[in-house]
Amino acid sequence: MAKIRKFDTKVQHLKYKVLREVARYAWQGTLAENLLNIPEIIVPGKQPTMRCCVYKERAVVAERIKLAMGGDKFNPNVIEVIDIACDECPMGGYEVSAACRGCLAHRCEDVCKRGAITFDEHQKAHIDKSKCIECGQCAKVCPYSAITNNKRPCESACKVKAITMGETKEAKIDNDKCISCGACVYQCPWGAINDKSFILDVIDLIRHSDDNKKYKVYAIVAPSISSQFTYAKMPQVTSGIKELGFYTVIEAALGADMVALSEARELVEKGFLTSSCCPAFVTYVRNQFPDLAPHISHNLSPMAALAKYIKSTDPDSKVVFIGPCTAKKMEFQQDEPSRYVDSVITFEELQALFDSKDLDITTLPGTDLDNASYYGRIFARVGGLSDAVVQSLKEQGIDNFDLKAVPCDGIEACRVALLKASKRVLDGNFIEGMACTGGCIGGAGCLTHGEKNKADVDRYGREAMEKTIKDATDVLTMFD
Amino acid sequence: MKVTVCIGSSCHLKGSRQVVEALQRLIAENKLEEKVNLGGTFCMQNCQAGVSVCVDDVVHSVSPETVDEFFRREILAKA
């Protein structure tokens, strides 16, 4: 039996268990008969461990099963709220608690630039909500930590302000603002916001391929995988993916090398560009900075570029992307990528698929995975794409272009750079937009997030046999 | 004549790039561009014996060292 894997949170573990059980029956082709048994498998006995009672727990599991099976077909977004799982957290913002002792110093008053702090007859602080801008300075300076932020974690996580409260206080997602980055999915302490899963589509693709004889199912894996599944060796993870029934595994980083090659040329031609690798960033630019949309690189994302190439060598093939990203689940449904990418799953879902087949990847012999260069691989962390474009200019002998890259770490940094660019005061000519903090390694579909992840990606990059973008992509262009 | 070189991970590590470069050069030197259709694929399920090169549905094991001889025997002689 497979060991219990490490996740960052118990919410992820619960989500994983549901995905695992749904997948287990799906492989056997008996999901319909067994669907109603899953809540009791996940929540056995009579003692609740998560909610008020086991019946509520099972009701939430039932909602999770729907998401594991693809979610609400009428909602175009891949991020959904499970209404009954939403705890309707307090939403007052910064508030003074009973810990306020009515001290003499009144640091809170001094630091508040808006004059929002007042005092009652006992010298206890109060916040005037009509003046407060929720900057949090008062909370930082209070010696008793008496000022707390009662903002909902989902709202705090959503830097694009797509989350509001419904009439019955449950979280609501504004699909016109949401970029599907999954920050709220990862941050909600109740697991009440989830990404829809396409694992059933992937299982169907594999099952109907007749052992890859009818058509071949290719897996493309994102380079951020190097910071994941650290309990096993990378070649064992590759073997595990093949054991699931994929024909072969290819690095999405090779698509990143292809992108680096053409993005450098496009940049020189146009003079100013934003990257197009991160689908959440691209959606954000289109939604919030439509005037800058023409400057988004016309390159396909590494995922779609590589899938396009695979389909050129094998037109009947099916291509599944495995990565850290919930926004990729939106991207692959868009017009052009949908022609090349058949489905998308996350690392969380990959772990569930391994365990749905009781596959202990630590016992498998390894399979090589080496298609890309160092530069393609480091796309997984912020700054990597910019480094790759610098290298690509050099390799192509373009020395008359003064590249000033602006790598943006997280969607807030993207916003600042885009705002400056829209006002023509940006000190730079290439915006590398990464919606997640740290880049793809910070994606909501990762099993774990940690300080070491960037170093893991860089080490993995250095292990690539090909050291230059040209060497990695030459083999593809030679067939043109 | 269809010649397909495997560029999957195992074959890549065993030198498929060098094999493709050599085949391309040899095809040009022997003016076979019209007759030989050179292409790539990711994996021929022959990973242990790479670099795998498929000539008209028959898979051969080639290395950067043996590619010249392979070209003469399997491509030049039959094209």
Image: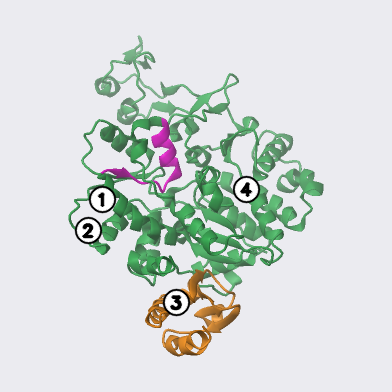
Chain colours: A green, B orange
- Compare marks 1 and 4 and give the one earlier in the sequence: 4
Estimate the spatial distance between the alpha carbons at disc 1 and disc 3, rounded to whole Å: 32 Å
**Relative image position of residue A385 (x, y in whole percent):** 34, 53
- Residue A353 is labelled as none
Pointer 2 indicates a residue of which chain?
A: A
Front-most of residues A99 and A230: A230
Q: Name the residue under label 3.
A: B16
Could one spot residue A452 in this view of the protein? Answer: no
- Residue at 57%, 67% (x, y): give it: A248
Q: Judging from the image, what secondary structure is the residue with disc 3 in? A: helix
Pointer 4 indicates a residue of which chain?
A: A
Q: Name the residue under label 1.
A: A268
Q: Name which residue type carries label 3.
A: Ser
Q: Quadrant of residue A351?
A: bottom right
Q: Name the residue under label 4.
A: A198
Are the residues flagged by discs 1 and 4 from a single subunit? yes
Q: Judging from the image, what secondary structure is the residue with disc 2 in? A: loop
| Residue A350, magenta (yes or no) | no
**Relative image position of residue A237 (x, y in whole percent):** 54, 65
| Residue A282, magenta (yes or no) | yes
Q: Name which residue type carries label 4.
A: Phe
